[in-house]
Image (cartoon, grey):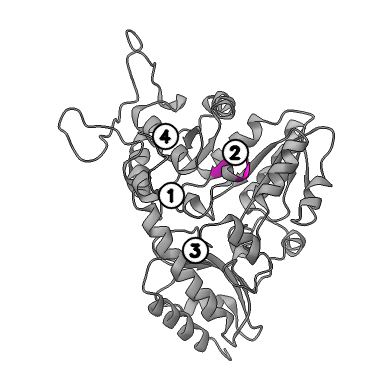
Amino acid sequence: MSTKKLGLNTICTHFGELEDTVFKGAISPLYMSTSYAFEDVEVKRYPRYFNTPNQVALSKKVAALEHAEAAMIFGSGMAAVSTSLMAFLSSGDHVVLQKTLYGGTYNLVTEEFQKFGISYSFTDGLQPKHFEAKIKENTKVIYIETPSNPLLTITDLAAVAKIAKKHGLVSMIDNTFASPVNQNPIDFGIDIVIHSATKYMGGHSDILAGAVASTTEHMDRIFHLAKNFGGSLSDYTVWLLERSLKTMGIRVKAQNENAQKMAEFLYTNKNVKAVYYPGLPSHPDHELAKAQMKGFGAMLSFELNDSIDAYKFQKALQLVKSSMSLAGVESTLLSPTKTSHALLSAEERENQGISDGLIRFSIGIEEIEDLIDDISQAIENSLGV
């Protein structure tokens, strides 16, 4: 089945599914075996080799969604990130990373890379010149994240891809916040696309997984390390993830609409001093986001006025859950300083612009009027406390 003429929701629903040849069921059968024959077979299948029937089928769906030649499914987003980076970095190599990154990726680089003799540089900003300024003779990879976690900064995909190709580097992106629904970095020249599939691909806060998509050549290199790292995903979770991907298009589009309305409400609220959402014309990267995104996403961050305690505000919520992680059909929010970026020092968070009062908001699919009412009452009940 070719994807050239298929729409997003059709790919989500049908591409890469397994045919039930025995009972003719409407969905992919689940192959739970961890042991397969090795004689008289075309493929010697083994779960750690990422090639069980369900693993292979789902990888085809992810590749189609990201306009890639091939893909792989991992046991977590960090398994996908670490394996991809280490597949292209060796002792003596250098990597350039953008200034604002997911805390887990930041910790991986700053805590582990020195053990392997890999050096790194974080950019001083997100303009193309900031990336090129950090490139050295031994640089091998440029790693970006856009929109970024948690401030929703936007990085110019085409510009970074051009710089990477100019210097013979591999470009990688964490595309989790956008999802394939809103952004396809490969179309802009980025080499490798990484996801925490726990988030929008899973979408129901009950799956832990990661995904990587790229050319067949790059994926072969990632596979040879991945089979030794052992970050594969169980087939039952693979099957659940395929089920979740069937509705990703309609889920994310509904969340996009809610996030835009919520951002506009917060922006005009007198008790909110800052809103970070690329769909707002006030966002410094709004025009860039319009140029490279099909939708602005369902993530935003905001800061309440200093007179309101962010923690007490969260405790006052009745509908929106104060919870870690993101991208479920239910709306959740958290304080990055206490969760995703808690392992960074106060100075490191300050350098990334992450204040103690910052709240990261993952918008779900509830009725937007109900969400706004809940935020409004929580603000009112936190005033003067």
Start-end of magenta stretch? 188-194
Tell me the kind of residue under disc 3. Ala
Tell me the kind of residue under disc 1. Met
**Label 3 to label 4: alpha-carbon separation:** 25 Å
Extreme-top residue of the structure:
40
Query: Does residue 191 appear in this view?
Result: yes
Q: Is residue 63 left or right of residue 15?
A: right
Q: Residue at x 77, y 37 (%)?
A: 166
Q: Nearer the viewer, mark 1 or mark 2?
A: 2
Is residue 107 within the magenta segment?
Answer: no
Q: How dense is the environment of label 2, judged by Cα within 10 Å: few (below 14), some, or many (20 and up)?
A: many
Q: Residue at x 48, y 64 (%)?
A: 323
Q: Position of residue 35 (x, y in %)?
A: 34, 21
Residue where numbered disc 4 is placed: 60
Occupied quadrant, residue 268: bottom right
**Label 3 to label 2: alpha-carbon separation:** 23 Å
**Label 3 to label 1: alpha-carbon separation:** 13 Å
Residue where numbered disc 2 is placed: 192
The disc label shown at residue 298, or none: 3
Q: Position of residue 217 (x, y in %)?
A: 58, 25
Q: Nearer the viewer, residue 204 or 64?
A: 64
Tell me the kind of residue under disc 4. Lys
**Label 1 to label 2: alpha-carbon separation:** 17 Å
